[in-house]
Each structure stands twice: as structure tokens, then as C-alpha cells.
Amino acid sequence: MPEPASGAVHPDLRTGAPSPWLRRILQGLLGQERRFWVLVVGVGLISGLGAVALLAVLRFTQHLFWQSNTEHFLEGALASPGWRRFLVPVLGGALVTLVSLVVGQPLRGHGTAGIIESIWVKSGRLPFPRALLRGFVSILAVALGAPLGREGALLQTGAASGSALSGWLKLGPGQARVLVACGASAGIASAYNVPIGAALFGLEVLLGSFALELFGPIVVSCVVATLVSRTLIADHPSYVIPHYALTHPRELLLALMLGVLVGGASALYVRGINFTSDLLDRLPSWLTPFMPLVAMTVVGLTAIAGPYLMGNGYDSVNMALHGTLPLTLLLILPLAKLAVTSLCAGAGVPGGLFTPSLFFGALLGGAFGMLVERALPGGAAPSGAYALLGMGAVLAGTTHASVSAVLMIFEMTGDYDLILPLMLAAVVAAVVSRRLEPESLYTSVLAKRDVRVPASVPHWLREEGVRSLLSPATQRVPPSAPFDEVVVLLLEQPAGADLYVTDAEGRLLGVITLDALKGHLPDHSLLQATVAADVMDTGVQPITPDLSLSEVAARFGHTELDRLPVVDGSRRLLGSLSKGDLLKRGRF
């Protein structure tokens, strides 16, 4: 291929990216740190513009297929005849199946989990063309009735733009990871007008840290993306609700009870999503591309009776927040929504699980509030207030991220007077859910692939210490044990195990290793007079049960032993700890 003429800037025809000539100019004009911050702003701008474009596609498609002049999906679907409610979702499933067959691979997979894996395992690498295609198909599927969230497309495109820009300018893996998190967070910020909550979501869920070095880039990207969406779409909370206040001690107690109930429901939500996915994974591989069509056909059949389960559920959530849904629907729809959402997500229909979880929590909270109203007539807050608490509690319970959940719900509704019961319900729900289901909605997918990511809480709050890895010391000898007995016992020990010399009260005196005996006594005439005390190593520093695993790792760094003895405060031998077990369990 001939070189471009001097002074011209041509794109690379194979990738669509600007030519290496332009890239070299940018790298020369900007230092590494300045270039990174320029990309942080660029990722926020691209994410904001991408969100505006994708949401425009969503509104246009909904208007085209549901013949509605309003922006509210449910109103148009309710006005549609039964045959339209059935055929349009089937068309959405056929579209996903067709695209899967054309590209030769299914579009299934949890988008947020893939982003987390990209950050922690793949040095921030995401396939840009596949992410754009998946995002576009996801928006179309949601517009056609898929019971999933629109945020999945915005997360994917934002994260993929960060990955593409970092790869284009050849940034290091550390900066690439941060840019991917910036793009994903900016996508959420622009989707829901929640810059603070989205920034904390990126730190708490995607990066697993509130480090100040990470806070700046995430905030800048979210601010830029939100500014774009507010300018081009709208500047108001996602849900405009009546003013609610829960300040009476009795209402705080009810918020605590709701947190416990919703915490259990959150664990059910995570397990339901995973159970359905595992079940569909067992189907023959030739059926996989056609499962989106099957799943959306089921959605269409349910929509004939009522369209409440279709789409991301924004309108139903809004009705629950205003207390206009009847109790029957508040009790039935959450489990039904979980069923169809699990089916579509497991079948390979692309979309987010964030918004369906808000549906799940809002309606459960609304049902709780309506039952409280009946039990305490005239003495309880409106059910819409508890619907808001249910949204925050489920978000915290499914993501195990209480801080970002509280701030997101506050920004979505703008109701600060509910912040105290909201915080209480969210924290309790997260604790209960984590106890019942250790993995979150996002990490559970990665756990199946044996991908471990850092937790958002400090590791020293989670690790169990030396006692959790303690193994009993099976062989110990007195200091007077003869040399031939010592050798036999050492040879009978498993690989890496040593012999411990203890006194009559079980206190550790020294350690005997097989390698240390080699060449230790060149004069064979002295072997009969040699005892354990003559060949033991008294320089080995034992460890105690109160040490953290990180401190034990530092001890192993200064010894060649595969095991270290564990003693109590009186140097009585308790057992030993293996380096292999430490490396399997510890985080350093």
C-alpha cells in the first residue's frame, strides 16, 4: 500500500483508526500523563454521545413498532393489540438469532462481568467491533420487548471506547484498565443521570477500590458524559416522584425489616439468574443460536395477557413509586420478571440486569409498603416510599455495593429525606444477601470460570488468618531422640514436611529438615552418639495464630522452608502452615 502524501491524515483502512503518523504526532505533543487525562475526557465525551445515539435508536424503534406518540413504553404496549404484543418480541428474538448466526458466535454473556474480567484479567482489552455490535443489538432487543436493561449497551460501548483508545495510543495496562472503568462508569452516568453514583459504582464494583488515584479519572469521565446527556437529552432525575419522608423510629424499624426481606430476595435473584444460565448451558450446542428466538417467544406469549414484563420496566417502577399498582401485580410481577429476565439473559439475548433488578426491588418494596398500610392504617408512609427503599436494597443486595447503590437511588429520585432509611435498608440487604450468596450478580459469572477479583472491602477484613490454614504437626521428637530414629522419621514424612523437636511440655525447641542433614556429620563414627538436639535448627522463627496471611507471606520470603511451625504465646507447638496452602488462599 503506498504511503499517504506528506501532510495528509488518512485512516487505517483495516481498523478505521487514524494512521500511525497522526498517532506519533499526538504521542509527541502530549506527555504520557497529559495524554492519559485527554483520553479520560475523550472517553467521557464518547460515552455521552454514544448514550445519546443509542437512546435515540431506542425511542425511534419503540415508536416505530409500538405506534406510540409517547416516550413511555408501557403505555404504547397496553394500547397495542395482542397479536402485536406477541409478534414484536418474536421479531426481536429472530433478530438476535440472525445476528448470532451471521457473526458465528452467540451474543450471550453478562456485559458487566465481561468488563470486570477485562479490567482484572485481560489488562483492559475488549473487542471493540463486537462490543459495538452487541450494544446496538441490545438496544434493539430491549425496544422490541426484551425484559432486560438498556444500560447494558451503554456500559459496553463506553468500556470498549476506553479500551480502543488506550490500545490506539499504546498506553500501559494500568492506564488501560482505568480507562475501561471510566468508559463503563460514564455509560451508567449518562444512562441514568447519576454522575456521583456511577463514579462510585466504577470504584466499588469495577475497580474494587476507593483509592484517590482512581477517583479523579472516574469522576472526570462521569461528569463529561453526564454533561453531554443533560445537554442533548434532559436534565432531571430519572424518576420524578412525590416527596416522601420516613423519619419516625417505627418507620426506620420497618426499613430494617424490609432490608432483611429484600436481602433474601436479592440472593434469590442472583441464584435465579445463575440457575437458568447453567440449565440452558446444558442444551446441545446446535440449539444455542436459536435460544434467543425461543426465549422471546415466551416473552411474547406472556405479553398477550399483559405487557408489564416487556422492556426494561421503567414505567412499572414509576407506577410503584407513585403507589398506583395494585397489590396483586406488586406480588406477582417481581417473580415473573425474574423468570423471563433469567430466561432471556441465559438464552443469549444481550442486555443489562441492572434495570430489571430495580423493577424487582421496587415492586417488592411497594408490596411491603402496601401490606404495612393495611396492617397500620393511617400510621404508615405511602407504599411508594417503600418501593424506593426496595430499589436501593435490591441494588445493594445484588451488587454487594451499598455505597454506590444508595447514591444512585438518591440521584435517580432526588429525595434526600429518605436517605437514612435508604442507607439502613441497603446495608442490611447487602449483609443478608452476602451471607446467603457470597458472590454478587457480577462476580458469580466470573467465579464459574475461576476468575477472582478483589473485593471492595479491605482484604484484612475478609482474610481469616493463620488459624484457618493450620495443619496439625503429626511428627515431633524429643531432643534426646537418636540420629537413626530421626532419619527414619524424616524419610517417612510427606514431601516438604519437617520434623519438630519439642520438650516434655510441647514447647518448640527447633526444626530438623532432611536437606540440613546432608553432609552435616562427615565423621560417621559420631553417628551413634548424635541426637536430635545436635542436628536441629534453632534459628527458624515460628509464627503465631494472630498473624495475618500477608505477614506470613513476608516470613516465607525470608526462608527456604515449605512449612513454618505455628506456636502459641508459650511456644507450645500447635501445628504448621504450608506455603502452598497460603498461596491458594491469601491475597497480597
Image (cartoon, rainbow, N blue to C red):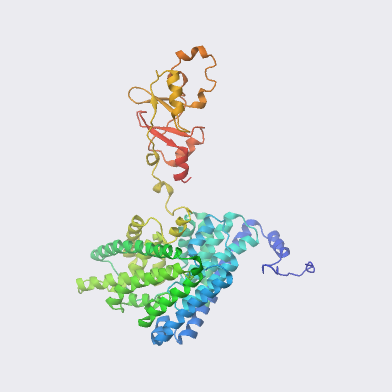
In the displayed structure, 36 sits above or below 311; it is above
> On screen, 422 above or below 536?
below
Q: Position of residue 44 (x, y in %)?
A: 55, 67
410, above or below 505, in the image: below
- The residue drawn where x is 54% and y is 59% is 118
Q: Please state the horizontal and vertical placement of residue 460, each as a whole percent of the image.
A: 41, 46
Q: Position of residue 549 (x, y in %)?
A: 43, 41
Q: Is residue 390 left or right of residue 93?
A: left
Q: As drawn, is 13 to the left or to the right of 241? A: right
Q: Quadrant of residue 443?
A: bottom left
Which quadrant would residue 224 be assigned to in this image?
A: bottom right
Task: Choose between 132 and 528: the one closer to the eye.
Answer: 528
Left-right relation of 510 to 40: left
Residue 114, given in percent of the width and then of the height, sits at 51, 61
Q: Quadrant of residue 466?
A: top left
Q: Quarter holding the N terminus? A: bottom right
Observer-nearest of 127 and 241: 127
Q: Is residue 57 visible?
A: yes
In-image side of 162 versus 423 (left or right): right
